[in-house]
Amino acid sequence: MPTGEETLEGAICQRQVEIKNADGLHMRPAMQFVDIANGFDCDITVSNSQNCVDGKSIMQMSMLAATCGTKLTIKAEGPDAREAVDALQELVEAKMFDEPPPGD
Amino acid sequence: MLDLRISTMEIKKGIAVSPGISIGRSLIMDSEDYRIPRRSINPSQRMIEIQRARNAFKSAISELTKIQSAQDSIEQRKIKDIFAVHLRFLHDRSLRKKITDFIHSDSVTAEYAVSTTLREIASHFRKVRDPYISERAADIYDIERRLLRQLLGRKREDVAHLTEEVVIVAHELSPTQTAGFNKEFVKGLATDAGGRTSHTAIVARSLGIPAVVALEDLTETISGGDTVIIDGNRGIVIVNPDKEAIRQYEEYSVEFVELEHKLDEIREKPAQTRDNVRITLLGNIEFTDEAELVLQKGGDGIGLYRTEFLYLNRPTEPTEQEHYQAYSQVVSAFKDRPVIIRTMDLGADKYTQSKRFAPEPNPFLGLRSIRFCLQNLTMFKTQLRAILRASVLGDVKIMFPLITNIQELMQTKMILRDVMEDLDEESIQYNREVKLGIMIETPSAALTGATLARDVDFFSIGTNDLTQYTLAVDRGNELVSTLYSSVDPAVLRLMRTVIQDAHKAQIELSVCGEMASEPEYVMLLLGMGVRVFSLAPPMIPEIKQIIRSVKIEDCNSVARKVLTMNSERQISSYLRNATRKILPEAF
């Protein structure tokens, strides 16, 4: 089950995800992330313990420099917020950016 | 490329390494680590810069899309991924906004905003502890370069496919970069770095196009597409010349060509004064292919064959065979005419400094030239062997640079004898009577000329170093360069001493510094008793024409007059007037 989920008025959706692939959120994963994010109308922000960035900007996403094991909070705001968060969570945790987990 | 900025004329001084005048649009070739200086703009121009930045993104995207679609095999997937990431960055609105906001808030150029912003991002990546992520900084630099290429001029690949005439501006040109030049369209070269032996100089001379090097920060003052005048005669580059400057240079360029033609006519005539004193005009060369130019210009031989080029731009020392080939080619071309080969004169530069753990604190007073050779005997002997072997092919003479005292000369001669003995043992032929000479280029050598003259066959006065060491002035240092003058009374008195000592000892004497190629110093040198000039080949006809227009007795009175003068300024203006009277078109 997703953790940290919180829905307000159906327009805001927020969820915590964990980076599970070995190499972390480097360039190619960041690219996949923003490609999916840009497919939605809602605004998407991603935050770690220190920064909150635009989930549709590859520059900002890659500057998060999230390594394996990092927990990120994805927050979407807009009509398709829930779908966006679902899709992004699937990419990060289920598909792991089509990359191997640590020790593979 | 349309340049929307208001341009102001800027004049830069460098070293002329290939003669001629060229006026054209600039094409800036990027080096791998381009450094963009902060350049403030007028707030009213901010919108123009913002538009330039946007256009650069647009062009970079279309360039990258084309490259990306060309990579379609599976092996190229990784490359394709990289380009895909770069494309996302170029499409990233927040990145663009960061750059355009920066232009707006700080009133800076698009180049500076792009470079600063992307380098900030890259340095952020570099700080990440995870190596996989920190290495991504390289991608950011790559994106920066791609955008800068759009802003600064066309991309490198285009140099091979030029369709209009350009002058190439670069920090420094590498052989890879120049290999792609389309000769038809490249009309001039100008670089920040470099010297007389730099790759740029070689290429320019072989293409016969004007070039100026050592302009220090030219690439920082110029933008791609700016109009540029390259004056390869005087070592001047003018960025964004005004109408008047362009008009003057167009005229000068025509005059220069006419003068060249006119001077070529006197090529076959002897360098003889009106009162029938025969003067010898020799050429200074650095590369084997310049020997041809000396013959074309009517030179009587080679008075200074610089050999430093053999050592530069290569990871290893030249072999004896490489030396020999370079010498034999020139010597054979000159047959019975003299070829004076100067032994390696490196020092106070990258070559010797890079061989040290720490740079010398005062390299011009350090281990350079003959001093370097005397401490690197294997290297020195290799060169001497090759010169001696070439000595049977023609009239070879050996000249040693920067001799400052008699011990150095004796030591050098002893090493030469060692090499001769080695050749004897191996039964290799050489000219036993090969003439030896030294350059007089320090006050110590000039003042002890009478002693040194006993052990050599000739002197050659190197006026550039002699002036630098006498006046304690680095002429490359703009803060003091106005103090540098070869006709300073102190330099002239030393020269007079050297000339007198050479005459007394009945040895040959020549002047091989730049002074010998200055039209206004010809009468003075003749009057001081100089009968052999060695100069840059393109200047030979002009100097010959002056020689053919004067009488020695007039020169003698000019020299007498000058040697009584106490100020450099007085001497300079007197000589300028004296020369103008006999050869008005030279000025």
Image: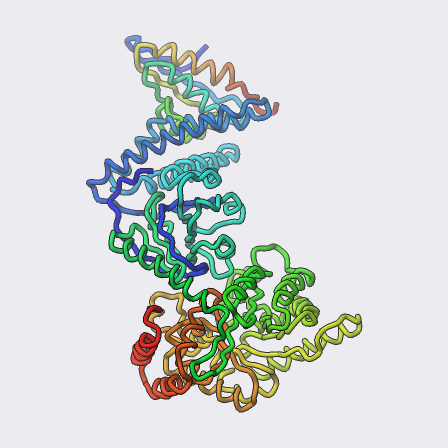
Query: Which image quadrant: the N terminus of chain B?
Result: top left
Residue B487 at what x, y percent from top left? 38, 78
Q: Is residue B461 above or below residue B61?
A: below
Left or right side of B572 for B371: right
Q: Residue at x 34, y 45 (%)?
A: B223
Query: Which image quadrant: the C terminus of chain B?
Result: bottom left
Residue A95 at what x, y percent from top left? 51, 15
Q: Residue at x 35, y 31 (%)?
A: B95
Left or right side of B557 for B6: left
Q: Residue at x 48, y 50 (%)?
A: B173
The answer to whether any part of residue A96 appears in the image is yes
Q: Give the quadrant of residue B468.
A: bottom left
Farthest-out residue, left:
B44
**Which residue occupies the foreground of this view, B528 or A40?**
B528
Q: Give the quadrant of residue B124.
A: top left
The answer to whether any part of residue B124 appears in the image is no
Farthest-out residue, top:
A10
**Which residue occupies the foreground of this view, B300 or B437?**
B300
Q: Is residue B451 above or below residue B284?
A: below
Residue B55 at what x, y percent from top left? 33, 32
Residue A41 at what x, y percent from top left? 33, 14
